[in-house]
Image (cartoon, rainbow, N blue to C red):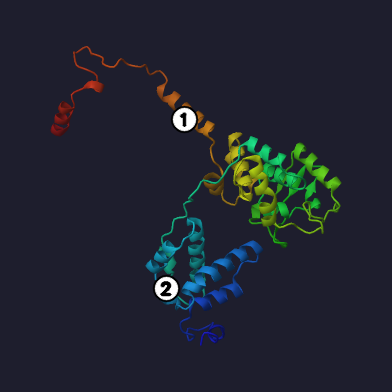
Amino acid sequence: MREVEPLRLRLNIESRLGGSVTIGTLIGRYIEQELPERHSTRRSYLTVLNRWIKPRWGEYLIEDVKTVAVEQWLRSLQLAPKSKTHIRSLMHLLYQNARRWEMVSSNPIELVRQSGRRLRIPRVLAVVEVRLLLEQLAEPYHTMILVAACLGLRVSEIIGLQWGDFDWDNMTVMIQRSVVQCQVGETKTEGSARPLPINPGLAAHLRELHTSSPFRAPGDWVFANDAGKPRWQETILQRQLKPAALRAGIGKIGWHTFRHTYSTMLRSAGTDIKVQQELLRHANIQTTMNIYTQAVSDQKRAANSKVVEMVLSGVKIRPKQQVLTNGSRTGADCDFSQLRQTASSD
């Protein structure tokens, strides 16, 4: 019956004669018809579907999944809040497709509560830490991290750079593709595929790498391996970056550390928030403001000092106890019992 169910669903797509279907069948149809084409997204969605959702809910009929049961299940998982949020979001997406296919009339996941609050603030490197890391890296990893720190690219976009993406006359680079595990795909958002300015200092390092590389054609990968193919980001992180960070004494880092660092440095330089969004190529400015950009401590102190200075401007320090002309004391040493009596009578 379970094997026949997908066929029955396709045969009865224009009627309700097909009856109820299971979550497993719904997942199968979603994978067949709606799964995103971008490789990294497909891989992430398939992992969540096959590792978490299908084993727990695959045998349930779609109308038998209840809000509170899903909420309690998510709460029991030993996962980070962000991972639980991804699971909830994908279950919600499954039911939205089920509604569109008229399998159900409501989405029980809409009322499932799951916080996506981070357990830890994303790591941000100081400029001196970036320099210490660079000292520990040989080429092409040295220039790769320069690109990450100076342009804030996603690692899939760094791996996906080709020499033909650079316009040396106008000193710009076009981010036109992403590469994950040698799979070439589109950029994450429409705003990602826009030209970025290249500083002359960074351009000098890139041109030096181009000169020394055996792969220099416009269609060659900037950070190609010995066979001329794109490198694997996980391998670079484990074999090159993490050991270099330990040698530099800066602790644990990840690829996204450099993107968060770039965003924070933009803010510390006083960059307009709209310019920050465009440089980071976020589709939503709230992502720039709420997730990536962190105020460094000196900025927080300076901002707070400005507010305090405005409040205290012209305010003089009073003595501990000052007698007014009518013989009463100031509010700082007044009789609170009298104040309570006055308040109650009012």
**Residue 128 in the image: x percent, y percent?**
64, 35
**Residue 245 in the image: x percent, y percent?**
65, 44
Question: Which residue lies most toward the top here?
Answer: 325
Please tell me whether mark 1 sits on a helix, a strand or a loop: helix
Residue at point 41%, 60% (across, down): 113
The circle on residue 304 is 1
Q: In this view, does 2 lie above or below 174?
A: below
Question: Which residue lies most toward the front here?
Answer: 247
Query: Quick check: marks 1 and 2 in contact, CB under 8 Å?
Result: no
Name the one closer to the observer, 176 or 207.
207
Q: In this view, does 3 lie above or below 126?
A: below
Q: Kindly identify the amino acid type of the residue bearing the numbered disc 1.
A: Asn
Q: Kindly identify the amino acid type of the residue bearing the numbered disc 2.
A: Val
278 horizontally vs 296: left or right: right
Q: In this view, does 150 lie above or below 63?
A: above
Name the one closer to the observer, 119 or 216.
119
Task: Answer with the quarter of the image where residue 188 lies.
Answer: bottom right
Residue at point 49%, 76% (across, down): 58
Rounded to the nearest whole Å, what is the CA distance between mark 1 and mark 2? 50 Å
Residue 78 seen from this side: yes
The circle on residue 166 is none
The residue identified by callout 2 is: 65
Q: Is residue 52 above or below residue 294?
A: below
Residue at point 65%, 48% (across, down): 242
Name the one closer to the observer, 16 or 176.
176
Q: Which of marks 1 and 2 is nearer the N terminus?
A: 2
**Residue 335 in the image: x percent, y percent?**
18, 24
Please tell me whether mark 2 sits on a helix, a strand or a loop: loop
Determine crowd level at label 1: few under 14, some 14-19, many 20+ residues with C-alpha closer than 10 A: few
Task: Answer with the quarter of the image where residue 324 lies.
Answer: top left
Of the 4 image quadrants, the one containing the C terminus is: top left
